[in-house]
Image (tube, rainbow, N blue to C red):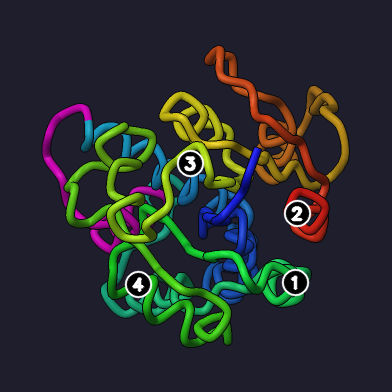
Amino acid sequence: MTIRAFVFDAYGTLYDVQSVLERVERACPGRGALITQIWRLKQLEYTWLRTCMEDFANFAVVTRDSLVYALHVAGVEPAEALVTELEDAYLHLTPAPEAHDSLRALEGHTRAIFSNGSVAMLDALVLNTGLKGLLEHVVSVDSAKVFKPSPKAYALLEPVIGVPPNETMFVSSNGFDVAGAKRFGFQVAWVRRGGGPGTAPADAGPTDMFKAQRLHAEMLNAKPDHVLGSLTELVDLR
């Protein structure tokens, strides 16, 4: 089937959300891994809860609230200066090692980000990491006032990029996003970094637990069209 556009999730797909760990550990010695993983898991949970409750607040608010929650759980006082310092890390996430080269290789197709991130967060992140010139569009869920995987969120894409879902390859490393995009009608590539699904050891720490979950498909009856080990394999799908 023809592919005219490649649309990328941002957090976890083009960008490594685990790259905040060093900054968190430096600010909260000995608690970095715990805070980082709870922060990310709660961040996702809050997007789903706010959508279900019809109580939208943009991703900057969600990111801050989930960080404060994680600090409380780890026994760290969420002082204003600390929270401000750590939430800034989401404006400077490390791109996936192959992100720049993979986007360049797809030149000639429409290339876009579609993310839960707020407009301001995404604009800053793309600018700070040198991806701005490699994308035709950066689309936030903000105007729909719901988060992925709501169909109302995915419906924002076609009017902006001018390509229908069945001619768009939606690329994500997040299982919930893969399922949501597939159900909406996109062609979908799941970027499953780290090889095939494994099992977490019984004494797995928070980081191992997080990674193990990401290697398993969600039980939501929506399988991706392609399972890739990295973004570089997208070139073969053009």
Front residue of 191 and 41: 191
Q: Residue shown at 42%/56% (left/top)?
A: 114
Q: Amino acid at mark 4?
A: Met
Question: Residue 197 location in percent, x, y?
Answer: 82, 28
Circle 4: element type? helix
- Relative to 150, residue 7 above or below: below
Front residue of 155 and 220: 155
Q: Residue shown at 21%/37% (left/top)?
A: 50
In the picture, measured across the screen, residue 51 lies left or right of residue 46, that is left
Rounded to the nearest whole Å, what is the CA distance between mark 3 and mark 2?
27 Å
Whether the magenta-drawn stretch holds residue 66 is answered as yes
Q: Which residues are magenta?
A: 52-70
In the picture, measured across the screen, residue 83 lies left or right of residue 34, that is left
Rounded to the nearest whole Å, what is the CA distance between mark 1 and mark 2?
9 Å
Q: Looking at the image, can residue 32 be seen?
A: no
Question: Residue 68 location in percent, x, y?
Answer: 33, 56
Classify 10 Å Cα crowding around label 4: few (below 14), some (14-19), many (20 and above): some
Contact, CB < 8 Å: mark 1 with mark 2? yes
Q: Amino acid at mark 2?
A: Leu
Q: Amino acid at mark 3?
A: Leu
Q: Which residue is mark 1?
A: 105
- Quarter that holds the C terminus: bottom right
Rounded to the nearest whole Å, what is the CA distance between mark 2 and mark 4?
26 Å
| Closer mark to the observer between disc 3 and disc 4 | 4
Which tag, 1 or 2, sits closer to the chain's start?
A: 1
Circle 3: element type? helix
Residue 143 location, quadrant: bottom left
Q: Which residue is mark 4?
A: 121
Q: Residue shown at 70%/76% (left/top)?
A: 104
Circle 1: element type? helix
